[in-house]
Image: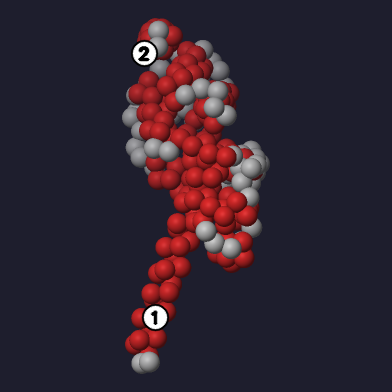
């Protein structure tokens, strides 16, 4: 066989290996999404994929390695979403952050639930981790300086407290959804209620009136 033939053979083998790896990883996603992280095993994955356990180990390593791959995909997807420019309006900004998250999760609810559980499993929600998911979420929850400059927020409540409360509203809503306690519509209403009530505590009279109107609409299921 010529050197070109050997090279083409190597390329073909690598391509097939990549396709097989992707197929098995898709099966892993489905198993974790439907069975849960605790019930997921490499032997189960091998059985569902129609390969041997050593093949799974050679391709992926340990169970935690697979979880890390799924969480890495989750983080990459989230990072791609949060780089989008959010509206400057306080009300629309809050809705944008929640709606864009809801639209993302709705693409594959089971997978994103499983991936968030995987992130918890890996300790990525540790608040002391500099580049963890908590720190990213806190950045999204920070009130904009222009809201204070425009007199929408009065500054009577410390800015960091507003930020933490907004973050907690988002976190608790997501946790309830991940655990299957609420659906995405309820998730949206729950998070927005928490955000709007937090802002209302430091809002100008004009903004306070608008926030109360928004809260009434949320209570009516809109």
Drawn side of residue 162 relative to residue 78, left or right: right
Label 1, secondary structure: give it.
helix
Say which residue label 2 marks: 222
Which quarter of the image is occupied by the N terminus?
bottom left
Give the residue displayed 49% in from the left and 30% down from the top: 141
For label 1, the residue is: 9
User: What residue do we see at 45% from left, 42% from top?
Assistant: 78
| Alpha carbon separation for disc pair 1 and 2 | 59 Å
Asked if the residue under mark 2 is in contact with the one under mark 1, i.e. CB atoms within 8 Å, the reply is no
Q: Is residue 84 left or right of residue 169?
A: left
Mark 1 Cα within 10 Å, few/some/many (few <14, many 20+)?
A: few
Residue 136 visible, this orientation: no
Q: Position of residue 26 (x, y in %)?
A: 46, 51
Q: Count the marks: how many?
A: 2
- Viewed as shown, does residue 105 lie left or right of 136? left
| Camera-nearest residue between 45 and 142 | 45
Q: Position of residue 27 (x, y in %)?
A: 49, 51
The residue nearer to you, when weighing 138 against 65, is 65
175 relative to 203, above or below: below
| Nearest the eye: 46 or 120 | 46
* Mark 1 or mark 2: whose residue is earlier in sequence: 1
Of the 4 image quadrants, the one containing the C terminus is top left
Q: Quadrant of residue 93?
A: top left
Task: Residue 116 in the image: state x and y as whole percent.
Answer: 55, 39
Residue at 59 percent across and 39 percent down: it is: 36
Label 2 SS: loop
């Amino acid at each position: 066989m010529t050197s070109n033939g050997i090279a083409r053979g190597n390329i073909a083998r690598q391509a097939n290996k990549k396709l097989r790896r992707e197929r098995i990883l898709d099966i892993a996603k489905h198993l974790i999404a439907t069975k849960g992280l605790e019930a997921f095993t490499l032997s189960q994955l091998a059985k569902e994929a129609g390969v041997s356990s050593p093949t799974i180990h050679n391709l992926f390593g340990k169970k935690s390695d697979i979880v890390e791959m799924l969480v890495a995909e989750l983080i990459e997807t989230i990072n791609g979403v949060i780089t989008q420019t959010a509206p400057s309006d306080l009300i629309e900004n809050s809705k944008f952050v929640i709606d864009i998250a809801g639209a993302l999760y709705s693409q594959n609810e089971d997978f994103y639930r499983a991936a968030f559980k995987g992130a918890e499993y890996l300790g990525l929600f540790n608040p002391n981790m500099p580049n963890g998911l908590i720190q990213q979420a806190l950045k999204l929850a920070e009130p904009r300086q222009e809201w204070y400059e425009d007199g929408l927020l009065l500054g009577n409540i410390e800015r960091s407290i507003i930020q933490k409360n907004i973050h907690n509203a988002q976190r608790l809503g997501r946790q309830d959804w991940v655990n299957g306690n609420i659906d995405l519509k309820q998730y949206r209403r729950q998070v927005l209620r928490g955000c709007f009530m937090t802002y209302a505590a430091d809002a100008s009279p004009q903004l306070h009136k608008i926030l109360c109107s928004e809260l009434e609409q949320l209570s009516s299921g809109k």
